[in-house]
Image (spheres, rainbow, N blue to C red):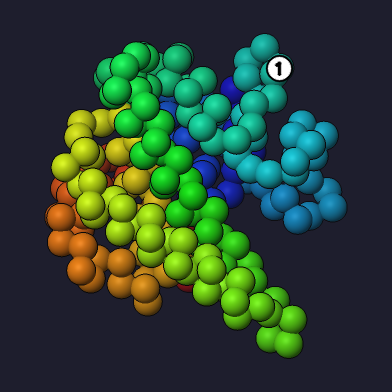
């Protein structure tokens, strides 16, 4: 398998965390990718031109991190499956993944808007994304007792909160959210988290 990736993408980090948890790292060739480069081949594989994009051993290109994560989970040889298959546990895990992915979507949109020339930035757009991030983290605090075990949901929430530390440290997401902060400190003490840290600076 070949994964087109960037070390700073939270969605890439999520699929790499899945790969570590499920014993698949040695089967994945990593291809560092700048999707903004005119030389990138990603749009020929993924018409959306985004990463992560995974090319399977039989040549199928998979894209969007939830699909890649579930595909890797289906191949896993280590540990227990991360995707519950039935009932309330499945929907809880998928909902948590959606919340986490939404936090990262808003965080990236907010950052990209802030990188535009100052005279072209929309402060209302930036604030809209900030509020979406804050509401989602508030929800996770309110539902901290549902962050149980190791699933695609809890792994995704770890990824999202770590991304806030990486890109939006000044938001101080832990303030006023003691249960979520305590859960994160414990849940992020895993090799899959340590081995997928994005570069600083």
Q: Quadrant of residue 62?
A: top right
Residue at x 37%, y 27% (from the top left corner): 91
Q: Quadrant of residue 90?
A: top left
Q: Residues within 10 Å of mark 1 (few under 14, many from 20)?
A: few
Image quadrant holding the N terminus, namely: top right
Let me know if residue 191 appears in the view: yes
Above or below, 76 against 104 in this view is above
Which element carries disc 1, helix, strand or loop?
loop
Counting from the top left corner in percent of width and height, residue 124 is at 59, 77
Residue at x 61%, y 71% (from the top left corner): 125
Left or right side of 42 for 180: left
Viewer-side residue, 44 vs 149: 149
Viewer-side residue, 171 vs 45: 171
Counting from the top left corner in percent of width and height, residue 174 is at 24, 66
The residue that disc 1 covers is 59
Viewer-side residue, 139 vs 78: 139
Residue at x 31%, y 53% (from the top left corner): 139
Counting from the top left corner in percent of width and height, residue 27 is at 50, 22
Left or right side of 66 for 151: left
Q: Name the residue at the bottom extreme.
A: 119
Counting from the top left corner in percent of width and height, residue 109 is at 60, 62
Residue at x 47%, y 46% (from the top left corner): 101
Above or below, 30 against 26 in this view is below
Let me know if residue 185 appears in the view: no
């Amino acid at each position: 398998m070949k994964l087109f990736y960037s070390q700073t993408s939270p969605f890439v980090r999520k699929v790499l965390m899945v790969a570590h948890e499920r014993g698949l790292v040695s089967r994945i060739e990593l291809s560092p990718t700048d999707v903004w480069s005119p030389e990138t081949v990603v749009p020929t594989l993924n018409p959306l031109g985004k990463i992560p994009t995974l090319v399977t051993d039989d040549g199928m290109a998979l894209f969007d991190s939830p699909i890649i994560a579930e595909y890797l989970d289906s191949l896993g040889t280590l540990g227990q499956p991360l995707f519950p298959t039935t009932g309330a546990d499945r929907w809880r895990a998928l909902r948590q993944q959606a919340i986490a992915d939404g936090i990262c979507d808003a965080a990236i949109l907010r950052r990209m808007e802030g990188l535009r020339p100052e005279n072209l930035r929309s402060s209302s757009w930036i604030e809209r994304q900030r509020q979406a991030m804050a509401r989602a983290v508030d929800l996770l605090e309110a539902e901290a007792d549902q962050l149980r075990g190791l699933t695609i949901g809890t792994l995704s929430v770890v990824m999202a909160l770590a991304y806030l530390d990486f890109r939006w440290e000044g938001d101080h997401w832990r303030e006023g959210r003691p249960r979520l902060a305590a859960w994160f400190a414990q849940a992020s003490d895993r090799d899959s988290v340590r081995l997928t840290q994005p570069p600083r600076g």
